[in-house]
Image (spheres, rainbow, N blue to C red):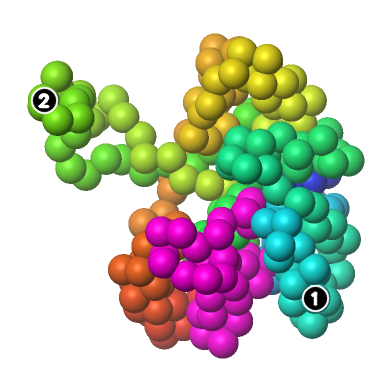
Amino acid sequence: MADYSLVLLSGGIGKRMQLNIPKQFLLLAGKPIFIHVLEKVDRIPEIKEIIVTCPADFLLKTEEVIREYGFTTPIHCIEGGETRQESVYKGLKQASYENTIIHEAVRPFVTEEMFQTLIQEKNENAIFGLDIPFTVLQGTTKVDGNLQRDQLVNVQLPHKYNTKTLLYAHECAREDALEFTEDASLYFHYYHSDITILQGSEYNIKITKPIDRKIAEAIYKETILMGE
């Protein structure tokens, strides 16, 4: 089984949450959201290092909080970029292993099983995704066209990629001044190669807006009752 680096994107500044602290520091069941992710990652033996991309002003605080929990996997905190894409690029440049998993600090309900499913997938490039359960139209201020939802996927993290090939794609995107919202679209743009889509989880939400905090609390209570 291959060894992995994990890049944990923890660069949010809480703008959409209307907060004066990054959303990854919000408490869920008494712990910062990103700590829930690190606790699960720390139990995955194939993940040999964790690279956390942080806002510059919160780099020391991130390191301080992490130290409190005594993780065994080596964790390196680095300054993230001004965009998500730049943060991934910086994380990949620090990755020591042939394969890299990318996850977001504000997706605390990822499970150990999801990481293992990703690792065990034979294709070295794989993502999680969900079906689109609602109608999607093309347009901004007016309808310009129909999109077929059975041909679309709601992209979730974590993802995994060959480190060198994804890093090269990021370098190409920087040269071309192209910006992508996540890595599967960036990777496919340059390689047009096969990326496996694994079945995602409706519980694996991204906590971005105030309503997401309420949903997260409900999910946490439910998962505790289910013994997960």
Residue 223 vs 198, above or below: the answer is: below
Residue occupying the far left of the picture: 142
Part of the protein shown in magenta: 9-38
Residue 148 vs 91, above or below: the answer is: above
Indicate the position of residue 78 as horizontal and vertical percent values: 80, 53
Q: Quadrant of residue 216?
A: bottom left
Tell me if 109 is positioned left or right of 56 in this view.
Answer: left
Q: Please name whichever residue, 221 or 122, is drawn nearer the observer in this view of the structure.
A: 221
Residue 201 vs 18, above or below: the answer is: above
Residue at 35 percent of width and 34 percent of height = 153
Indicate the position of residue 140 as horizontal and vertical percent values: 20, 30
Residue for badge 2: 143
Residue at 72 percent of width and 21 percent of height = 171
Residue 73's label in the rendered image is none
Look at the numbered disc 2 and give the secondary structure of its residue: strand
Q: Amino acid at mark 2?
A: Val
Q: Amino acid at mark 1?
A: Glu
Residue at 41 percent of width and 59 percent of height = 16
Q: How many marks?
A: 2
Residue for badge 1: 64
Look at the numbered disc 1 and give the secondary structure of its residue: helix
Tell me if 205 is positioned left or right of 109 in this view.
Answer: left
Q: Is residue 14 magenta?
A: yes
Indicate the position of residue 110 as horizontal and vertical percent values: 54, 60
Q: Quadrant of residue 177?
A: top right
Mark 2 Cα-neighbour bin, 10 Å: few <14, some 14–19, many ≥20: few
Estimate the spatial distance between the alpha carbons at disc 1 and disc 2, rounded to whole Å: 49 Å
Q: Quadrant of the N terminus?
A: top right
Residue at 31 percent of width and 29 percent of height = 152
Q: Is residue 19 magenta?
A: yes
